[in-house]
Image: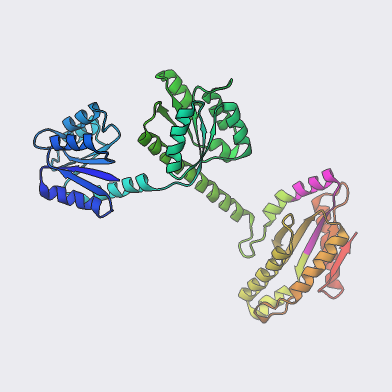
Amino acid sequence: MKVLVADPSRFMRNVFGSIFLARNIEVQTVENGCQALIALEREDFDLACVALELGDMHATELLMCARARQRSNVVSFVAITSDREKAHIDAALAAGFSACFHKSNQAAFEAYVDTWTASATRRLNGSVLLVEDNEATARFCREIMQHMGLTVEVKASAEAAVDALRHRSFSVVVTDFVLAGLQTGLDLIHFIRARPGAAGRTPILALSASDNAGQRIEILRAGANDFAHKPVLPEELEVRLRNLITLSDLFASLDAQHQMVKDMAQRDRLTGLYNRHRLEELAPELMAESRRTHKPLSLVLIDLDHFKRINDTFGHAAGDKVLIAVASVLRNGARSEDVAVRYGGEELLLLLPGLDVKQAALGADRMRRHIEGLRPSDIPVTCSMGVAALKPDEDFEALFRRADAAAYQAKQHGRNQVIAHQ
């Protein structure tokens, strides 16, 4: 990156130039407006930091001349001034300066430079679906995106883009309005916004060569997040994409936080197993699946033996360690499709899709033996288990009662055993 600093004062040129140099940004300094215009014509700059009063001209004159010559129409201009008149500052902003800082407020200026530098230099991670039927424009956009660190997939029609979106997700969609095929970019935007969940919130940048304001408004109303007029400048495309990738990252972070909160609400805080609320959601689904596929569904109820005695003898902290250790056995011994739940107190349970009562009882006994060998904090631990398999037209309460009765029978018969009810 390269920055131009224009100020009649050598001292101020050094002060503001040093701010950029400290951030490893190349700096060229000039003392008046004419020198600034010559520099802007000869070289490419990413930012021009200009005093409002340049001696030979006002900064707004410099800005208008630079814009008129087109050479510098992509440079960001920032004004620095010793004038505290708000009207003068507002006039500079109205003329096209991105920001205006008082020379005594270097902290605010440095904060601006840090933000600008981070935005301009950060390589991005993400994927872009570029929908453009002009090969030259597609190549131009793809090169800019790849230079930013993005992976790019190009499609020439809305139909091809829709097919791609059905098979994978993208961080951003960039689409022209006029496309090959029967559908337009507007149709593609409608398709994306009609999709459920995160797919329907994919950020969209629309491109169009048309000056039709009504068309532009319709594109934004349909759900495009941003709009750029073609031919789009490389710097403009990059900035707009950076903003949308940031938006995409925020959406992803928000989704992850929502999922984390949802998961926390569904899990027991101590053991990390699902809680009863989640069981009430999952049990009907698993039962319906069992009946639809004619595959068995078994329930294992686990009751820790003499748990009250453990709490009374060793303390509740030790009891918590016992529960955590037993929950770990369930989690590690279960298959990915199994559901492990802390039902309440020292009662845990497993829902085992696809296993009949005999298979479930064998698996439960393996876990029982593993639990017997745990000895968390040197505390002996055993459990009594009851197993039952879902019967036709049986509800969950009936299934649970049969497994609970089997567990009670295991306790009555001496504990530390598995009993199955057919």
Residue 350 versus residue 216 in the image, above or below:
below
Q: Quadrant of residue 328?
A: bottom right
Q: Where in the figure is residue 161, as x and y percent of width and height?
A: 58, 31
Q: Quadrant of residue 160?
A: top right
Picture coordinates of residue 283 (x, y %)?
Answer: 75, 50
Is 236 or 353 nearer to us in this picture?
A: 236
Direction from residue 74 to residue 189 in the image, left or right: right
Q: Is residue 194 visible?
A: no
Query: Where is residue 150 drawn, in percent x and y?
Result: 47, 43
Residue 96 seen in render: yes
**Going 57% across and 53% down the picture, which residue do you hit?**
260
Toward the left, the furthest residue is: 55
Q: Is residue 287 magenta?
A: yes
Segment colored magenta: 283-301
Residue at the (47%, 36%) spot, across then down: 142
Residue at figure coordinates x 26%, y 33% from the top left: 72
Classify 353 as above or below 234: below
**Magenta segment includes 366:** no
Quadrant location of the C terminus? bottom right
The part of the image, by quadrant, that contains residue 243 is top left
* Residue 12 image point, x, y percent: 14, 48
Residue at 61% x, 74% y: name it.
317
Q: Nearer the viewer, residue 311 or 371?
A: 371
Q: Horizontally, is 55 left or right of 387 in the view?
A: left
